[in-house]
Image (tube, rainbow, N blue to C red):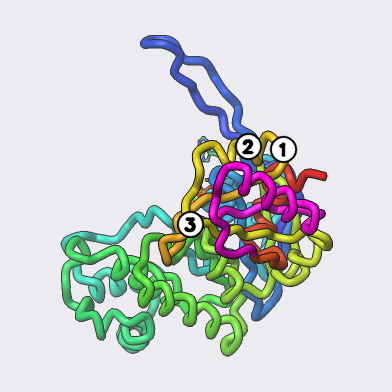
């Protein structure tokens, strides 16, 4: 699967006041190139609105690009869309097309017939897939789709994407909103489909933990352009001197993080940790100096520091680094 300099603009109307609206142009993609090889899972990451779904829709022939080129197994997604459709399975976040009054199995029979699959082969395939995605063990096979939970819907959507046993899968946030067992099931299936069956998979997710588990490579896009790409390890090593400092406190004195920001420290997150401690993170290229600044400021505010950890950046830090301002100093 190849995408070369894909660009896409949307023309939208923005409401101004009650009756007037003016036209606004949104540049969703501004030249995105990527490649997914056989047997590879590539994670397409980026903040909300970065252009991930738009890229997936263009690759799956649901949307035409304004310029650029994309192909799947050599077939052009614009000029040879019907060939491309035979080679891909798609899972979108907003699943359309399933029938509420049909059971999971009936829905799959419907889509299989639509794809022109022969009855006996189709029944065998559906039986296999319902088992594979775990709908059998959830008792979902013969229940109406409208009664399905989110996890059951996602599993059925994955089964539908796999009906024709396509060599390419385009999965847009397949684990969105799923409970840990359902998400884990989908993750391990995706891994196996790539490793054992050699499928090429483009996968989007906002869960960095999941991306590290599932994806061989990552393409990080921001505002419609590729901001970084590589294996999760390569991306982390692109932040060579960056360290993450985690500071755990018994309480969070009022104004402490504001004071730190005033002193030029980039406080990234602020949470209450599981053990009741408060924790915040600072990304820096000067860990020693920054730790000493943090200590001074914390002491001046009467904070009780329990521990300070200096760590290598995580994939989430990489994401933040390439999509936000970057690390100061
Ligand atoms: N049909 C449309 N009409 C107008 N604008 C659109 C349309 N589809 C997407 N956009 C805009 O294009 C940009 C990219 O959207 P896209 O859905 O590709 O982002 P995304 O990376 O998938 O985000 P998310 O993580 O929230 O799913 C956004 O600014 C969005 O508002
Ligand atoms: Mg999206």
At numbered mark 1, what does the secondary structure look like: helix, strand or loop?
loop
Q: Is residue 212 above or below residue 261?
A: below
Confirm or deny contact between disc 2 and disc 3 (CB under 8 A).
Answer: no
Res 263 label? 1
Q: Which mark is residue 259?
A: 2
Depth check: give the residue in front, 63 or 301.
301
| Residue 236 drawn above or below residue 140 | above
* Secondary element at image label 2: helix
Q: Residues within 10 Å of mark 2 (few under 14, many from 20)?
A: some
- Depth check: give the residue in front, 70 or 54: 54
Q: Is residue 139 magenta?
A: no
Report how far apart the C-alphas of labels 1 and 3 lie in the structure. 22 Å
Q: Is residue 40 rendered to the left or right of residue 126?
A: right
The residue segment tinted magenta is 280-308
Location of residue 47 with respect to 240 vertically, above or below = above
Question: What percent of the width, then of the height, locates residue 302?
Answer: 55, 46
**Horizontal and vertical percent for residue 284?**
75, 53
Pair 2/3: label in front: 3
CA–CA distance between discs 2 and 3?
18 Å
Say which element carries label 3.
Answer: loop
Residue 43 visible in this rendered orientation of the protein = yes
Magenta segment includes 305: yes
- Could you say where residue 25 lies in the image, as x and y percent from the top left? 60, 27
């Amino acid at each position: 699967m190849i995408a070369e300099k894909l660009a896409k603009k949307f023309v939208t109307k923005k409401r101004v006041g009650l009756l007037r609206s003016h036209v606004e142009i949104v540049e969703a993609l501004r030249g995105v190139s990527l490649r997914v090889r056989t047997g590879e899972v590539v994670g397409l990451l980026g903040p909300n609105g970065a252009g991930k779904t738009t890229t997936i829709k263009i690759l799956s022939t649901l949307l035409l690009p304004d310029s650029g080129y994309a192909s799947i197994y050599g077939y052009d997604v614009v000029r040879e869309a019907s060939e491309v459709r035979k080679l891909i399975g798609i899972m979108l976040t907003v699943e359309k097309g399933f029938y509420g009054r049909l059971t999971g199995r009936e829905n799959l029979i419907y889509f299989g017939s639509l794809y022109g699959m022969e009855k006996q082969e189709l029944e065998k395939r559906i039986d296999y897939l319902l088992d594979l995605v775990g709908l059998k063990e959830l008792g979902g096979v013969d229940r109406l789709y409208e009664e399905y939970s989110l996890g059951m819907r996602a599993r059925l959507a994955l089964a539908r994407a796999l009906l024709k046993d396509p060599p390419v899968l385009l999965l847009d946030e397949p684990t969105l909103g799923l409970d840990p067992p359902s998400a884990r099931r989908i993750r391990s299936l995706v891994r196996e489909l790539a490793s054992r069956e050699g499928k090429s998979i483009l996968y989007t997710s906002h869960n960095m933990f999941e991306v590290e588990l599932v994806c061989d490579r990552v393409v990080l896009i921001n505002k419609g352009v590729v901001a970084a790409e590589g294996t999760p390890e390569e991306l982390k090593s692109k932040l060579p001197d960056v360290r993450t400092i985690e500071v755990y406190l018994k309480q969070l004195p009022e104004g402490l993080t504001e004071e730190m920001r005033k002193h030029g420290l980039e406080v990234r997150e602020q949470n209450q940790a599981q053990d009741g401690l408060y924790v915040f993170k600072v990304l820096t290229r000067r860990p020693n100096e920054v730790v000493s600044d943090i200590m001074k400021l914390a002491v001046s505010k009467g904070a009780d520091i329990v521990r300070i950890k200096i760590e290598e950046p995580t994939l989430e830090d990489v994401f933040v680094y390439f999509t936000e301002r970057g690390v100061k100093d």
